[in-house]
Amino acid sequence: LENIHKIPEDILKKASDGNIEAFEEIYKSASNFIYNIALRITNNREDAEEVTHDVFIKIYKNLKNFGYRSSFTTWIYRIAVNTALTACRKRSRELKRTTQYTDAIKIRYIEKIVEEKKTKERNETLLSSILDILNPDQRACIVLRDIHELSYKEIAKTLNININTVRSRLKRARKKLLAFASKGGAVE
Amino acid sequence: MNCNKTQKLLLTNYSDSEIDERLLKKVENHLLSCNKCKRFLQTLQERAIEPFRINQEVHVPEEIWQRIKNTIKTIEKEQTGKLLHHLLSRIRFPFRVSRPVFAVITAALIIVMSVIIIRVSITKKDRINIYLQAQLDFLSYLASDDDTYGFGIDDPDLGTKIEKYFM
């Protein structure tokens, strides 16, 4: 996130005029940030790559109209989260047509992961499994709050919803995680 | 404050540090005296909040930038194509909208141009003829003994009476 804050205004200006080298600078500073948001919200590497690609194309096309009405970081957050949520909805429509994931399958999966010894890999898979329990809207709120540590106000602004909706999504998400853990899908 | 309200706050505002001083004190006082809510908070932290803190940054695959660059190239090509198409359609506009009018104007222009060319060529021809005639006259004067070249035979204008006398 710090890298994005450091992007000089003249680089944004040049990129908005179609300068590809300036745009590459923006990519270098923001790509990991966007990819990680996309990865946590979609919870799927393939989708996260697609979302990262789409987000940068949106930035390239709309940088001229950005107009500095909000900070560049807020703008990027908004595009990234919304593109990721759109990808989730698309994926969930496809999933409905193919397989239905049941809680029982998820519980067995998490128990299996917890038994594994490789810590880094296990943490990554564990995080992915927990995120998989939540729906995309809840996942977006949890990712912005618990991973990116945004305030309720910032989350509301990013997702274009009111603060009470943020609060209620977080509450439902955490209740779901607690209920899931009490069923046997202990996370640690 | 009862357990229900406390747990509601523990799930959101308390855990996210979005709580005012007054409510914070009430929650903390309740936690001091209620083991059930204390356990709830512990479970909540362990199972629904802390797992996300283990998040490690994952690096974006290198090939993404190449894909983005390729898409940008395609977009730019499309934009150039659209611009050309737009310009061409603007140029074609008068021809397409009033074809009969255009045909009439073209025919009229051709006629006017032909007339002008013909007239210009006729005037040019006359001038050449006059010039040739003058040259012939001069040559015939040189060949003859006549020294009154340039003066009219019938009524040579010799100016004053004195001039006429001397001539």
Image: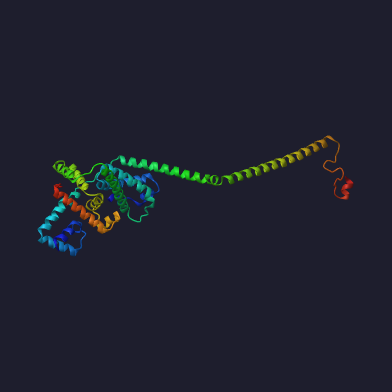
- Place of residue A86 in the rendered image (x, y in percent of width and height, measured from the top left): 30, 48
Judging depth in this view, the residue of A61 and B108 nearest the camera is: B108
Taking the image as drawn, is residue B36 in sight? yes
Whether residue B153 sits left or right of residue B83 in the image: it is right
At horizontal 34% and vertical 40% (from top left) the residue drawn is B67
Q: Residue furthest bottom?
A: B22
- Place of residue A144 in the rendered image (x, y in percent of width and height, measured from the top left): 25, 52
Q: How many marks?
A: 0
Judging depth in this view, the residue of A108 and A17 nearest the camera is: A108
Above or below, comparing residue B137 to residue B24 in the picture = above
Taking the image as drawn, is residue A32 in sight? no
At horizontal 21% and vertical 48% (from top left) the residue drawn is A131
Judging depth in this view, the residue of B77 and B162 nearest the camera is: B77
- Snapshot colouring: rainbow
Residue B142, quarter of picture? top right
Residue B26, quarter of picture? bottom left
Whether residue B165 sits left or right of residue B132 in the image: it is right
Residue B16, quarter of picture? bottom left
- Place of residue A157 in the rendered image (x, y in percent of width and height, measured from the top left): 29, 56
Q: Residue furthest right?
A: B165
Q: Residue furthest top?
A: B143
- Place of residue A180 in the rendered image (x, y in percent of width and height, measured from the top left): 16, 49
Whether residue A54 sits left or right of residue A185 in the image: it is right
At horizontal 47% and vertical 43% (from top left) the residue drawn is B85
Whether residue B51 sits left or right of residue A90 in the image: it is left
